[in-house]
Amino acid sequence: MRRDIVLRVAAKFIMAPLILFALYVQFHGDYGPGGGFQAGVIAAAGVILYAIINGLGAAQRLVSMALVERLIPAGVLVYASVGLVSMALGGNFLDYNPLAHDPVHGQEWGVFFVEAGVFLTVFSSMIAIYYAFASRRAS
Amino acid sequence: MSTIDPVFVEAFLSLALMLLVMVLAVAIVRIRGLFAVVVLLGAYSFVMATLFVVLDAVDVAMTEASVGAGISTVLFLGALYLTDVKEATGTARRIAPLFVAAVTAAVLVWGMSDLPDFGSSAQPIHAVGADYLGRTLPDTGIPNVVTAVLASYRGFDTLGETAVVFTAAIGVLVLLRRRSGERS
């Protein structure tokens, strides 16, 4: 597939809008459809497309397996630490109200970090599962 | 010229899409060539996503389209590459599985007759829905109620879901990853 010029050029055109759309879905999730989960899947699809067109080695130079393996638990930790921070500030676990000077701002910060945690875990999980499949040879 | 009733349009679209889903499901079960089955599964997911849009569940539609039609298709193709593209023809008798499937379907249809009517205000979910719709914006400042409920009101559930994704990824990695000492 590496020599197919149509696929290579088409993929190049799709990659950047795909990542941009993932960021839009992530940060616009408060106002429109989407959120961390969908954005993570779309961004992972961008990396997987790159891996399919340019080979696994090229993709792993871009997003290495070691990085992906660290990002999977990092997302859960980011999510859980939002809960711990709100506890430290005097609220309940995952109660975002104390995170900022007024409750509504606190909620917005809380949702932002929680969605970021979801994004990290989903994005890296999808890539890790693809890498695990793609790095095995057919028996 | 009289305008078309939107209720009729929605009902017609839902029926047509469900019919398409049924046709695709039967085709997926009948076809032995697994490459075609993977492509049909992607089509199935896209039709389901469209159905979710008709039902006004845009967030679910987005998830279905990206996960069901996108990532799953790639992973299925990866699995096909590792195994075989032709489904083995089974020699087992078909009476017992057919019986189990028919009984399960009958029980499900029987159970469905007890559900409240689609969209009726008597549904248990609507007992609290109006409350959430009213207080989401003043409470959280987030206009999308789905995001507010997922990330804030039900933040604990979503933490669990993230942990599930984490666990699934770790499980797949442990099962599939080639160890450094293993010969390829």
Image: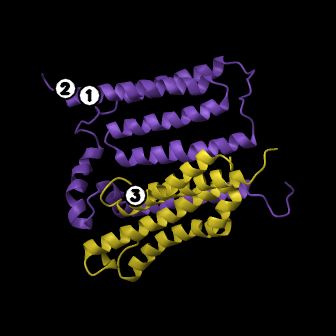
Chain colours: A yellow, B purple
- Mark 3: secondary structure: helix
Q: Mark 1 is on which residue type?
A: Val
The residue to which callout 3 is attached is: A25
Q: Which chain is mark 3 on?
A: A
At a point 25% along the width and 45% down the height, the residue shown is: B126
Question: How many marks on residues?
Answer: 3
At a point 60% along the width and 51% down the height, the residue shown is: A8
Residue B117 in the image: above or below residue B149: above
Q: Which chain is mark 1 on?
A: B
At a point 87% along the width and 56% down the height, the residue shown is: B183
Q: How crowded is the residue under tag 2: few (<14 C-alpha within 10 Å), some, or many (20+)?
A: few
Q: Which mark is residue B9?
A: 1
Quadrant position of residue B47: top left
Q: Determine contact: label 2, label 1, CB under 8 Å.
A: yes
Residue B137 in the image: above or below residue B18: below
Quadrant position of residue B151: bottom left
Distance CA(mark 3)–CA(mark 2) = 34 Å
The residue to which callout 2 is attached is: B4
On screen, residue A78 versus residue A4, left or right, reads left
Q: Which mark is residue B1?
A: none
